[in-house]
Image: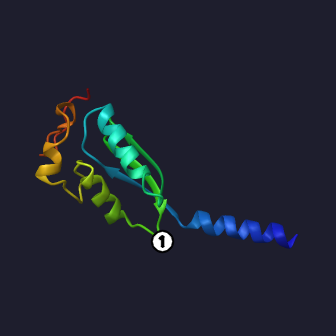
Amino acid sequence: MIAIVAFTMLGTAAFAQTKTDKIKVLGNCGMCKSRIEKGLKSDSSITSAEWDKTTKFLTVSYDKKKLDEKAIHQKVAALGHDTDKAKTTDEVYAKLPGCCKYDRTGKTEKAH
């Protein structure tokens, strides 16, 4: 009985550390989706990342004791994609494939 209570408390504590955010991320195509999701999932503090190329929203779950929302925005920008709180550098953006070059003014282009 004590073991069951202990496991329940540990499971609840682990779950309580996970936070999920929705972040607007600019991009255009399946290559953008792959880059964003794989790039974020390579961080062990991120448990899931799903970017929707139609809505341009990233749903990301992460360990809030190891990362915060600002760090997620910075990680996305480092991959070459602007968010409302972090912009990629011109040098990183320039290295994106042509189909991935979104309108940096915030207007979205047609998905490829």
Give the quarter of the image for residue 75: bottom left
Above or below residue 102? Residue 8 is below
Spot the residue most to the right: 1
Which residue lies at the image location 60% right of the left edge and 63% below the top edge?
A: 15
64 or 95, which is in the foreground? 95
Per the image, the residue denoted by label 1 is 65
Give the amino acid at mark 1: Lys
Percent across and percent down for residue 76 are 30, 53
Number of marks present in the image shown: 1
Q: Label 1 crowding class (10 Å Cα cut-off): few <14, some 14-19, many 20+?
A: few
Percent across and percent down for residue 30 are 33, 32
For the residue labelled by badge 1, is the local secondary structure a helix, a strand or a loop? loop
Percent across and percent down for residue 54 are 32, 34
Scheme of colours in the image: rainbow
Give the quarter of the image for residue 109: top left
Q: In the image, 52: left or right of 107? A: right
Q: In the image, 108: left or right of 13? A: left
Which residue lies at the image location 38% right of the left edge and 42% below the top edge?
A: 51
Which residue lies at the image location 39% right of the left edge and 67% below the top edge?
A: 68
77 or 20, which is in the foreground? 77
Q: In the image, 31: left or right of 104? A: right
96 or 61, which is in the foreground? 96
- In which quadrant will I find the N terminus? bottom right
